[in-house]
């Protein structure tokens, strides 16, 4: 019997093992053509000509660092900025750890003769006029099946909810892609706490089949007055060990 060597699968296994050994908690692949619906200038091939695949990596935030965020009346935050500052420091640290893994995978691909562009976790390349990043790692994560959008516009993973950081590597290597997740965590969420607790009233129930409806300018404006916010991450019951 002739055993056919599946190059795309073999490459995927190598990358997945490398990412896991370096400390990544989440790994998935999406074909770049599945992200061609992004706005012009933000599609994979606009950033890396001949892009074929996008590797999405995630790392989990420590639960205790999320749980230190203010709770109760989320609009009464005047004595809580030290807690938000600690959380902001943690997310920054995890993003940097994840970026080291992303860089290592990108170099791994380069050494094999491919091109690789790393969309960092710690630097989104945001256009502040529209609050849109160069490349949407969140959309790539959803298309890759790592998770689905929640009403708060964060990616909710089955394992860790929105308590994650994400990064992506665009490459011209063809790697076997994964499939989107068929799940909706929000439709059965009791009390939609992300909406109820958002201090800037930025989140609403989405309509017209959209996955979320968020006023990101209101959210951003609120965060200019605080070290960070992330109340919507903390109160989301998915991935919260204390809710189980
Ligand atoms: S708190 Fe509930 S409604 Fe909001 S994103 Fe999480 S699961 Fe969805
Ligand atoms: S991070 Fe933004 S959307 Fe989330 S709760 Fe805070 S202000 Fe609202």
Image (spheres, grey):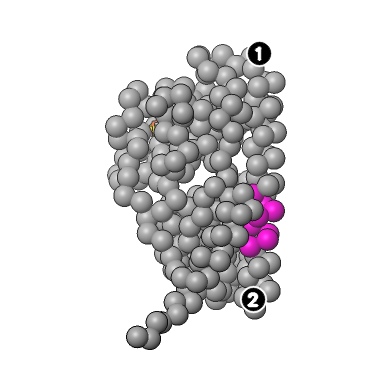
- Vertical side of 222 occupied by 45: above or below: below
Q: Identify the residue at image location x=62%, y=49%.
A: 23
Q: What span is colored magenta in the figure?
A: 98-105
Most foreground residue, 18 or 179: 18
Which residue does the numbered mark 1 point to in the structure image? 79
| Quarter that holds the C terminus | top left
Position of 28 compared to 92: left or right? left
Give coordinates of residue 79: x percent, y percent: 65, 13
Q: Name the residue under label 2.
A: 112
In what quadrant does ligand 1 lie? top left
Q: In which quarter of the image is residue 204?
A: top left
Q: Within the magenta stretch, is there residue 100?
A: yes
Residue 43 can be seen, yes or no? no
Return the residue found at the far bottom. Answer: 2
Depicted 43 relative to depicted 186: above or below: below
User: Residue at point 48% right, 52% down?
Assistant: 141
Q: In this view, does 103 lie above or below 111?
A: above
Q: Which mark is residue 98?
A: none
Q: Residue 131 is drawn in which quadrant?
A: top right
Q: Is residue 216 left or right of residue 96?
A: left
Q: Where is residue 143 in the image (x, y as percent from the top left)?
A: 42, 56
Q: Is residue 209 magenta?
A: no
Q: Residue at x 46, y 24 (%)?
A: 242
Numbered disc 1: secondary structure: loop
Per the image, label 2 sits on a secondary structure element best described as: loop
* Quadrant including the N terminus: bottom left
Sort mark 2 into few (<14), some (14-19) or many (20+) by Cα contacts within 10 Å: few
Q: How far apart are marks 1 and 2 (CA)?
A: 52 Å
Percent position of residue 68, x then y: 60, 22
């Amino acid at each position: 019997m002739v055993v056919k060597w599946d190059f795309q699968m073999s490459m995927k296994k190598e990358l997945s093992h490398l990412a896991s050994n370096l400390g990544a908690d989440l790994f998935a692949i999406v074909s770049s053509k599945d992200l061609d619906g992004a706005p012009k200038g933000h599609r994979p091939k606009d950033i890396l000509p001949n892009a074929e695949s996008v590797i999405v990596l995630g790392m989990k935030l420590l639960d205790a660092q999320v749980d230190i965020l203010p709770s109760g009346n989320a609009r009464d935050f005047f004595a809580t900025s030290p807690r938000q500052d600690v959380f902001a420091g943690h997310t920054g640290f995890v993003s940097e750890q994840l970026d080291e893994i992303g860089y290592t995978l990108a170099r791994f691909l380069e050494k094999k003769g491919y091109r690789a562009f790393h969309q960092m976790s710690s630097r989104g390349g945001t256009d502040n006029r529209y609050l849109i990043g160069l490349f949407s790692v969140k959309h790539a994560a959803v298309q890759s099946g790592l998770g689905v959008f929640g009403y708060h516009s964060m990616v909710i993973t089955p394992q860790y909810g929105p308590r994650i950081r994400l990064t992506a590597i665009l490459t011209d290597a063809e790697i076997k892609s994964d499939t989107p997740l068929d799940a909706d965590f929000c439709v059965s969420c009791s009390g939609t706490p992300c909406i109820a607790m958002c201090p800037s009233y930025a989140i609403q129930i989405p309509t017209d089949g959209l996955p979320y409806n968020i006023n990101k300018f209101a959210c951003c404006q609120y965060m200019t007055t605080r070290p960070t916010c992330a109340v919507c991450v903390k109160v989301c019951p998915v991935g919260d060990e204390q809710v189980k």
